Image: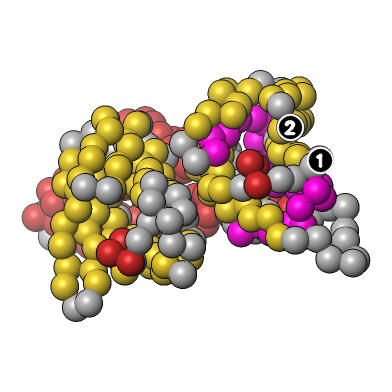
Amino acid sequence: MKRCPLVSTAHIARVVCILLLAASVNAQNESWDSPLCTESALSVPRGSRAVMTCNISNTFADVSIWLEGQIIFNEAPQGNSRLDDWELQVQGGQARLMINDTQDVHTGLYLWQLHGHQRDYKNFTLTVSEPSNKETTDTPSSDPVKHFQQRARPDTLVGVVVAVILILGLTGIGALICHRHHRSLKSQWIHAVVPDLRHRILWTLLLLAASLNAHTQTWDNPTCTESEVSAPRGNRVVMACNISNTFRDVTIGLTANGKTSTIFNTKPPGNYFNDSWQLQIQGGQAYLVITDVQDIHAGQYVWRLNGNQRPPDQFIVLNVT
């Protein structure tokens, strides 16, 4: 009975490389921060306590928080940090921003930069309402830690699936090589083609695994403010879009009354002005600021963001009341 010949040492080395890359992809998927935060829109009665929370699956290196483009906490490390009425607690992979006596000065758009194994950005909008007869001391929110544990498992399975696919693929290739080797005893040209085919398939799998590992770490992951924003006439409005990489260019258009016009088409970083609009871009952060919002500013804003990729356009509708 004919047996399949033993695989050479070089072939074994290539197989080991592919399996190690699969394990590396698995490890990278298990090390994603996977940030999970409380609701992006928060409203509390004046004078009550407001709490915003973000958690990641790894340990925070630092946390930075801006309010309406003004820095509150800059790369705050583990522990407790205070500034005026704001208190930031960072412990392990949990971060809480607390305001004990919420007033109008605390309202607006909060931008969080979460730095664990990666950098992620999250936006919160805090508004203050008049207190009712029945007040609560804390803002209602779901338990992000418990919810995170329920979500984290599917993310870590991605690497396992990739490893299984690669192993199954190698098994199938081995069977194909063995089968063609038997046929090569009858056909000399197959005997010459199979080694070349085998090498190409092995190197293709190697490159695919390396490509997957590289690309999964460089997605822009755009995060923007709520898709619909309402503001009273004459107030200040801030819209923001952020990516996990650095912006190469940002284009913003406004569609109103059936017409679309380009407001900004810029190469960051810098501050840009166009009539009553101001665009601030720094790194992976972009703010569109309108100091005195009027009817001419209402409409659908189209953000075209370009970092390491060009993700789908982001849409934010501004209503003026």
Q: What numbered label is drawn on residue 54?
A: none
Residue 275 shows in the view: yes
Q: What residue is shown at x 67% (from left), y 31% (from top)?
A: 59
Which residue is label 1 attached to? 100
Q: Residue furthest right?
A: 134
Q: Pick the residue in front: 62 or 226.
A: 226
Check the picture and name the quadrant holding the N terminus. Answer: bottom left
The region drawn magenta spans 41-67
Does 241 lie within the magenta span? Answer: no
Q: What residue is shown at x 68% (from left), y 55% (from top)?
A: 128
Residue 41, picture quadrant? bottom right
Q: Are marks 1 and 2 in contact (CB under 8 Å)?
A: yes
Q: Pick the residue in front: 305 or 100.
A: 100
Q: What numbered label is drawn on residue 85?
A: 2
Chosen colour scheme? secondary structure
> Disc 1 on helix, strand or loop?
loop
Q: What residue is shown at x 24% (from left), y 54% (from top)?
A: 252
